[in-house]
Image (cartoon, rainbow, N blue to C red):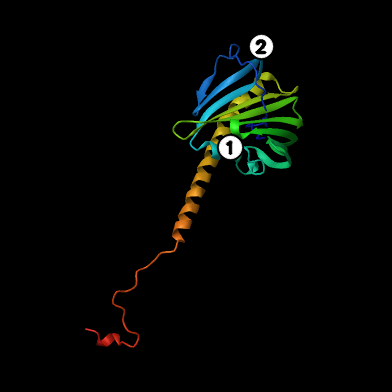
């Protein structure tokens, strides 16, 4: 799903490539995330982050493919809309905030839900390279392993700044997905509880019903 997320800029899609951390050995664990710098041809291109979401894969997929609702829970997304759909392809229009500025871009997403893969790429926008992917994998305990790959480039943004912004944004991105999953699960529980409270309850009839013309004051 097109969910471009940067703490101070917007993110998009990564086409699979050989990833090495030789030039950036500080791959690290941060806030329940494993973040790996993505180096291609000796140059920093982006990052890959993997974390565990306490929700089943189906719910996580629903979150990352919520194009029309991303602006309600994803950081820095001001507006996000699906403008066209064809089979497993979705075209989107997104406005995200970069400091005091707003950035508009169009992207195309390709959904492969059975494989748990969603790839997206900027078609029109300010970045020279802005593409990424989500990978959803089930875990034995019912939770989900979620991986987000992002490749981002802009001629006016130095590598060290891109790297800082990307790595700084990833914990907030995963925190938003986790929080959304929690809220959706709680909402599902509330709906289930509401159905139970409105269920028809059968009450046994009184074994010794009083006659309508009986005067209660005369009863022993």
Q: Where residue 61 is drawn, which disc sits there?
A: 1
Residue 20, disc: none
Q: Is residue 100 visible?
A: no
**Residue 54 percent coordinates (x, y):** 48, 36
> Residue sitting at 31 percent across and 78 percent down?
209
Q: Which residue is mark 2?
A: 42
Q: Position of residue 215 (x, y in %)?
A: 30, 87
The quadrant in which the C terminus is found is bottom left
Residue at the (54%, 18%) spot, across then down: 27
Residue 196, x across and y down, in percent: 44, 57
Percent across and percent down for residue 117 are: 61, 30
For the N terminus, give its image quadrant: top right
Query: Quick one: SS at disc 2?
Result: loop
Viewer-side label of 1, 2: 1
Give the CA separation, mark 1 to mark 2. 33 Å
Label located before the other in sequence (1 or 2): 2
Residue 150 versus residue 75 in the image, above or below: above
- The crowding category of the residue bearing disc 2, from other C-alpha atoms within 10 Å (few below 14, some 14 to 19, many at least 20), is few
Mark 1, other Cα within 10 Å: few <14 / some 14–19 / many ≥20: many
Residue that lies at the very extreme toward the left in this rendered image: 220
- Report which quarter residue 95 is drawn in: top right
Q: Quadrant of residue 166?
A: top right
How many callouts does the rendering have?
2
Q: Is residue 177 left or right of residue 123?
A: left
């Amino acid at each position: 799903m097109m969910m471009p997320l940067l703490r101070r800029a917007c993110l998009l899609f990564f086409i699979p490539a050989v990833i090495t951390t030789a030039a950036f050995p500080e791959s690290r664990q941060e806030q329940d995330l494993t973040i790996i710098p993505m180096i291609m041809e000796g140059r920093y291109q982006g990052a890959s982050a993997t974390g565990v979401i306490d929700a089943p894969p189906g719910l996580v997929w629903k979150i990352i493919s919520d194009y029309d609702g991303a602006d309600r829970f994803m950081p820095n997304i001001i507006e996000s809309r699906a403008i066209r759909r064809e089979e497993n392809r979705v075209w989107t229009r997104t406005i995200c905030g970069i400091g005091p500025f707003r950035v508009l871009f169009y992207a195309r997403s390709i959904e492969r839900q059975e494989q748990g893969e969603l790839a997206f790429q900027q078609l029109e926008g300010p970045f020279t390279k802005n593409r990424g992917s989500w990978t959803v994998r089930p875990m034995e305990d019912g939770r989900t392993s979620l991986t987000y790959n992002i490749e981002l480039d802009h001629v006016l943004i130095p590598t060290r700044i891109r790297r800082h912004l990307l790595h700084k944004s990833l914990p907030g991105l995963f925190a938003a997905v986790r929080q959304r999953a929690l809220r959706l699960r709680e909402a599902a529980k509330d709906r289930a509880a509401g159905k139970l409270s409105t269920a028809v309850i059968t009450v046994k009839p009184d074994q010794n019903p009083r006659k309508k013309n009986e005067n209660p004051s005369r009863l022993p």
